[in-house]
Image (spheres, helix red, strand yellow):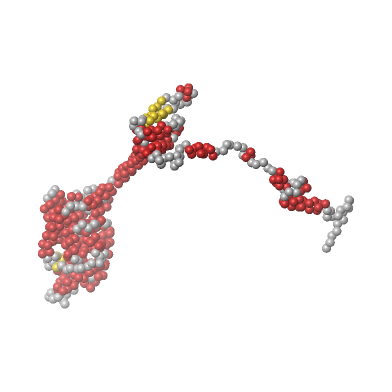
Amino acid sequence: MTEAEPAFSICHESAAPIACPRRMNASKALEKTLVASPERKLEADADLVVVRRVQGGDVAAFDQLVAKYRERVVGIVYNMTSNREDAADLAQDAFIKAFQSIHRFQGQASFFTWLYRIAVNSTMSHLRKNRLRSFFSLEGIRGDDPVARDVIEALTDKTGAGRSAFISELQEKLNDAMQKLSINHRTVVTLFEIDGLSHQEIAEVMDCSVGTVRSRLHYAKQLLQAELQPYLRP
Amino acid sequence: MKQDTNRKITVEDLLSLKRAERPPVEFWASFDSELRAKQLAAIVAKRSLWDGLPRIFAAVGRHHLPFGAVAALALTWAGIHYAGGSLDGVHAVSLAPTARAVARVSVPAAPAAQAAGQPALPRVIQVAAPEAAPAPVAAAASRVSEATPAALPEAPARNQFSDVVAVTLADFRATQPELARREIFGSDREFETAVESMRQPAVEPLSRLDPVSDDRRSRLLAGGLPAYASSSPASYASERVRERVSNDRMYESMDPYESSNSRMSLEIRF
């Protein structure tokens, strides 16, 4: 809750973000991203209205932001930690930090990116402090996801015999392969493959260049391919 | 197990399973309640003082050049102010009793000096104020004020220091007369008289030498004169010189070539 996070302290939006050239470059990159995707632009504008209400003293308006982003934030943290309890705690901490620092948010970046950065930095700091601890927990796979359903049907018998055991085994293998990645590579894979962020957004969230994001993603996929080779079909 | 072998499975497909993972509904209920409690605690809890340090450092980092310049100016001003003001302050404090006891009266310089064309130096006469200071202090102050007027502008710091020492010594003598007797400390002029008595009048360095005796003169001159010239067979060294000179004379008297008057015979031996 009150742990020191230098990355968060450095990267979060302050009163005068123009003074930081890296942040300015990231904001420009975000503007390009928002222009490229009108949905994100609309989403950012809607969030900014709610944020202004919170900044004006309407504390209850922050619940809208929590309800909107809690699943995505918990999903990111869970895929980075592979632990449900840690994911819940870290996601709550991220929301609390965002709530405490929301008066410094000026809308030059989208609230979604700002919140992601807080959550990712909190999770990365937590993982660095607890490198040796690995208590995995499995979540249920949502059946209405068409891609996941196709993959499961392709890998298991059409009759459904032994499907749940195979899914559990595959989930363990996936968690194990993800935990073998470094924190940065795992974060990139989580943000790109699982949460669907673009390279530009990942670069802004992780405060690095797009080339670094692409390089990390390529390397992480190679490692995952080697780890999950028995489950792959070329 | 019969599988759909026609479908291609990639890493991205496997990671889509992670995307489909969702916690149960009861998880969100507990998540919301815990988040609400933490949020209320964050509102109620007073933030520590050091939470604002990153903002302070960020502000300093943005304006590091003006802050640095202001800090340098402040340090310079403080250094000049306290370095220059401290001496004045100490001087003012140390001389405060004296300043109260001594009144300075400036009188014009001697008319003779003005007539001689020399610059007129103000003559400072310090007069003790008996109603404001104790008697020993006033006496010491009056004694210190006997300095010549020409020395005052040359070494003001030294005079100030000597003033302080003199006043302190007089004060000590007034308060502790049994410890300030002449047997213990002596007089401040006693050292000068003692040194004056030890001084010798300046004399010619050669006149301070003792006259050389005849014995010593003969001994010194023995090395420079032939032995036969010496009139007195005095010392051992002169005897040896005499012996050596006698042998030389003896060899000189011999003719190694046995030469006669006009012929010389040369004998060669193998």
Q: Residue furthest front?
A: B178
Which of A193 and B111 lies nearest the eye of the viewer?
Answer: B111
Query: Which residue is located at x 26 percent, y 57 percent?
Result: A208
Q: In the rendered image, which quarter contains the C terminus of chain B?
A: bottom right
Q: In the rendered image, which quarter is residue B65 located in?
A: top left
Which of B36 and B14 lies nearest the eye of the viewer?
Answer: B36
Query: Is residue A161 visible from the viewing direction of this image?
Result: yes
Query: Which residue is located at x 18 percent, y 70 percent?
Result: A171
Query: Which residue is located at x 48 percent, y 39 percent?
Result: B191
x and y percentages locating residue A135 in the rendered image: 20, 68
Q: Residue furthest bottom?
A: B1
In the rendered image, the vertical position of residue A79 relative to residue B97, given as above or below:
below
Query: Across the whole image, how many numbered discs are drawn on residues?
Result: 0
Q: In the rendered image, which quarter is residue B136 located in?
A: top left
x and y percentages locating residue B207 in the rendered image: 63, 38
Query: Is residue B6 visible from the viewing direction of this image?
Result: no
Q: Is residue A201 left or right of residue A53?
A: right
Q: In the rendered image, which quarter contains the N terminus of chain B?
A: bottom left
x and y percentages locating residue B261 in the rendered image: 88, 51
Query: Which residue is located at x 12 percent, y 64 percent?
Result: B27
Which of A168 and B185 lies nearest the eye of the viewer?
Answer: B185
Which of B226 and B80 lies nearest the eye of the viewer?
Answer: B226
x and y percentages locating residue A121 in the rendered image: 23, 58
Q: In the rendered image, which quarter is residue B258 located in?
A: bottom right
Q: Is residue B225 left or right of residue B121?
A: right
